[in-house]
Image: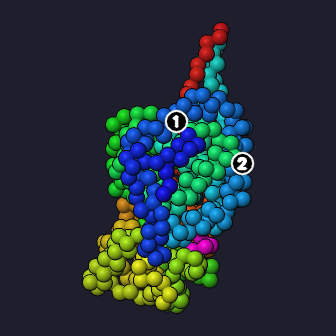
Amino acid sequence: MQGHFVDNRHYPASSGLSIPMIDPSDGQVFDAIARGNADDVNGAVSAARRCQQTIWSRLPAVDRGRLLMRLSNAVVAHADELAAIEQRDCGKPTRQANADVAALARYLEFYSGACDKLHGVTIPYLDGYSVLTWREPHGVTGHIIPWNYPLQIFGRSVGGALAAGNSCVLKPAEDACLSLIRVAQLAAAVGFPAGAINVVTGYGHEAGDALVRHPDIGHISFTGSAAVGTLVARSAAERHCPVTLELGGKSPQIVFADADLDIALPAIVNAIIQNAGQTCSAGSRLLVEHPVYETVLSRLAQAFVKLRAGPARLDLDLGPLIRLTQQQRVRSMLAQAQASGIEILAEGQIIDQAPPTGFYQAPVLMRDVPSDSALVQEEVFGPVLVAASFRDEDDAIELANATRFGLVAGVWTHDGSRQFRIARQVRCGQVFVNNYGAGGGVEIPFGGVKSSGYGREKGFEALYGFTTLKSVAIRHG
Ligand code: NAD
C-alpha cells in the first residue's frame, strides 16, 4: 500500500481508505494507493505553502536549477526502476516506458537551465520614472495528471512550475500514479526541501476536486479529458484562479499526392499505435488526397495486419489499454461504426499468450469514414485510425478543421508553399510538416485551441503560464 508523499514523508490516507492498483496486462490487482480526500489535500497545500514562504521563494534561481538538474540525474540513475513501475502501472511496452523516463530526465534538464533565464523587462516611461517588470511565481500550483503519460506530464508540468519558483501539489490519476510517488521520493533524496513537491493520490471527484477548489492554490495545470476540464475550469473560475487546460485531440494527418510515402506511412502508423492510441496528440484521422488514397490505404493495411498487441513486458507494437472500461468503450465505438456500415479495412492481432483478463485491443484501420461519424468527432483513445479522401487543399483544410478539437496536425507534402498555407489555416496548437511528433519535443510549446484547451506547456513558453507579471513604476525624479 502506497501513501501520499507530503513534506518529504509518506502519509496514509486520513480516511483509511485505499484504491486497488490493477496491472492492465493481466487485469490483476498488484498494489493499492491511498484514497485521498479534502483533509489530505489541505495537509499537502499547507506543506507547499510553508515551503514556498520560508525556503523556495528565497532560493536563488540558479540553485533551483541545480536541484532540478540533480533530479534529472537521479531519474537517469533510476531509469530502469522507474520504467518498470510505469510499465506495470500503465501497461506500456518497454520501449515506450524507457522513452517516457528519458523524456522526464530531459524535461528536468531543460527546465533546470531555464530557471535563471526568466527575465523581466524595463519599459521607457515618463521623465523621472523607471518602470520594470517582474515574473513572479503563483505560489502553490496544483497539477492534475492523467494516466497515459504520468512521468512525461510530471516533467512538463511540475518541472516548469518548479523552475518558475512555485511549490507544487499534484494529484496523479487513480489508475497510474506509482511512478510519481517514486519521483517525489527521489526529489527528496537529492535535496528538494520538504513541501516543494507533494503528491496526493485518490479519485478526481474527491482529491482532484478538493485541490481545484483550495483557496491557497494559485494556478491549476489540468491535463485530461475535455469533460473534466470543463468542471475544473468552472470550479477555478469561482475564485478566479488561472488554469491551463491540456485536453484531448482528434489530430489529422493530411497526406498529399506528392508526399514521400516511404517516410510518411511508418510515421502515420506509429502516431496511432504509440501507447496503444492513448495519446492526446495521436494522429487519429487520416486525410489523403484522392489520387493516392487507394495506394495509401493498401500499404497501410499491409502494415496494420502485421501489428501485434500483447503484455507490456513483451515489448510488442502495442500493450494493453489502461482499464476494462476503456477497452469496453473502444469496442462499443467500433461496433456502432460497423453497424452504421463503416468498413474495417485491416486489423492487427492480439497474441495468443496475452492473458484474457488483460485489456487488449488490436489496432484497427477503417476506410471512408464520414465526417459526422463519432469515430471522427470523438476521441476514441485507442488504436483506431479512420481514413477519408479529399479533393484539393480547400477540402483538406475544411475536413481537418471539422471537429471540436484542435491540438496537433501532420502535413505531408513536398510543395513548400502549400506547407505554409496548410500550417497557417489548420486550427490547432502544433503543426508537424513531413514528420509527426506525438508528444515529442520538450523544447516545443504545446497546447490546444477549441476543446483541446488553452495555455501552453513545454518549452520556455510554459514558464510564462507558471508565473504572473508584476509591473513596478518608480518615480525617482
Ligand atoms: P480524465 O479527465 O478522466 O482524468 C484526468 C485527471 O483528472 C485524473 O487525475 C482524474 O483523477 C482527474 N479528475 C477527474 N475528475 C475530476 C474532478 N471532478 N476534479 C478534478 N480532477 C478530476 O482523463 P483521463 O481519462 O485520465 O485521461 C485521458 C484524457 O486526457 C484524454 O482526453 C486525453 O486526450 C487527455 N490528455 C491530454 C493531454 C494534453 O496534453 N493535451 C495529455 C494527456 C492526456
Residue 170 visible in image:
no
Q: Which mark is residue 319?
A: none
* Residue 135 spot, x, y in % from top left: 59, 33
Residue sitting at x 33%, y 44%: 234
The residue lying furthest to the top in this view is: 477
Q: Nearer the viewer, residue 125 or 120?
A: 120
Q: Main secondary structure of the magenta part?
A: helix
Residue 103 visible in image:
yes
Q: Would residue 472 be found to the left or right of residue 236 on screen?
A: right
* Residue 354 spot, x, y in % from top left: 48, 84
Please name which of the two marks, 1 or 2, marks the residue nearer to the observer.
1
Q: Nearer the viewer, residue 110 or 76?
A: 76
Q: Would residue 139 be found to the left or right of residue 378 on screen?
A: right
Residue sitting at x 53%, y 43%: 6
How crowded pointer 2 is (Cα within 10 Å; few <14, some 14-19, many 20+) is rated as many
Mark 1 element type: helix
Residue sitting at x 41%, y 44%: 14
Mark 2 element type: helix
Q: Which residues are magenta?
A: 93-97
Dot 1 or dot 2, earlier in sequence: 1
Residue ID for mark 2: 70
Residue ID for mark 1: 47
Name the residue type under label 1. Ala
Could you give the CA–CA distance between mark 1 and mark 2, rounded to whole angstroms?
22 Å
Q: Nearer the viewer, residue 68 or 447?
A: 68
Residue sitting at x 53%, y 85%: 307
Ligand 1 closer than 8 Å to label 2 CB:
no
